[in-house]
Image (tube, helix red, strand yellow):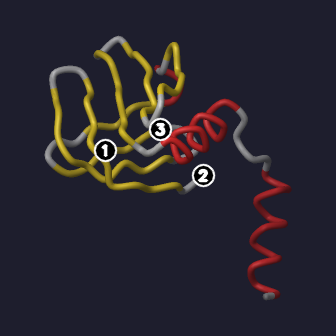
């Protein structure tokens, strides 16, 4: 998926500025604190204004991504791009 954003984040007892990276199977947070959050552990994932919110057994997750980016992340997590669509995008980028 490969989306990345510098943002304020809360995860469990941790809070601070991080670079949040959305991978195909996890969200990686690096900065004031570090964490890896497997997408399979996320529950009740939703957006609220500029935030992407969810919960895990390790605590609540809140990423202040901005309204548009939060919706994009939610969409990518709930309906990840298929391999053919990823390959088509790569081919299109190489041609242009």
Q: Residue at x 28, y 37 (%)?
A: 9
In front: mark 1 or mark 3? Answer: 1
> In the rendered picture of this protein, how many numbered marks are placed on residues?
3
Q: Secondary structure at mark 2?
A: loop
Horizontal side of residue 21 vs 89, given as left or right? left
**What whole-number distance in Å separates the C-alpha atoms at marks 1 and 3?**
10 Å
Badge 1: how crowded within 10 Å, few (<14), some, or many (20+)?
many
Q: Of residues 7 and 83, which is closer to you in this image? A: 7
Q: Residue at x 37, y 48 (%)?
A: 20
Labelled pair 1, 3 in contact (Cβ < 8 Å):
no
Q: Residue at x 52, y 27 (%)?
A: 47
Horizontal side of residue 56 vs 58, given as left or right? right
Q: Earlier in the sequence, mark 2 or mark 1?
A: 2
Horizontal side of residue 56 vs 70, given as left or right? left
Q: Earlier in the sequence, mark 3 or mark 2?
A: 2
Query: Would you place residue 38 above or below residue 43 in this image?
Result: below
Badge 3: how crowded within 10 Å, few (<14), some, or many (20+)?
some
Residue 33 image point, x, y percent: 16, 42
The picture quadrant where one finds residue 54 is top left
Q: Which residue is mark 2?
A: 1
Labelled pair 2, 1 in contact (Cβ < 8 Å):
no
Q: Secondary structure at mark 1?
A: strand
Query: Would you place residue 42 above or below residue 38 in this image?
Result: above
Q: Which residue is mark 1?
A: 29
Residue 61 image point, x, y percent: 35, 25
**What whole-number distance in Å separates the C-alpha atoms at marks 2 and 1?**
15 Å
Q: Of residues 5 and 36, which is closer to you in this image? A: 5
Q: Secondary structure at mark 3?
A: strand
Mark number, residue 26: 3
């Amino acid at each position: 998926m490969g989306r990345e954003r510098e943002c304020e984040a809360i995860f469990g007892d941790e809070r601070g500025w991080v670079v949040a990276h959305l991978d195909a199977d996890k969200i990686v947070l690096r900065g004031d604190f570090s964490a890896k959050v497997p997408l399979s552990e996320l529950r009740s994932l939703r957006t609220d204004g500029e935030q992407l919110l969810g919960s895990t057994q390790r605590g609540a997750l809140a990423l202040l991504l901005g309204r548009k980016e939060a919706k994009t992340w939610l969409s990518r997590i709930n309906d990840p791009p298929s391999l053919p669509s990823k390959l088509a995008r790569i081919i299109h980028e190489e041609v242009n």
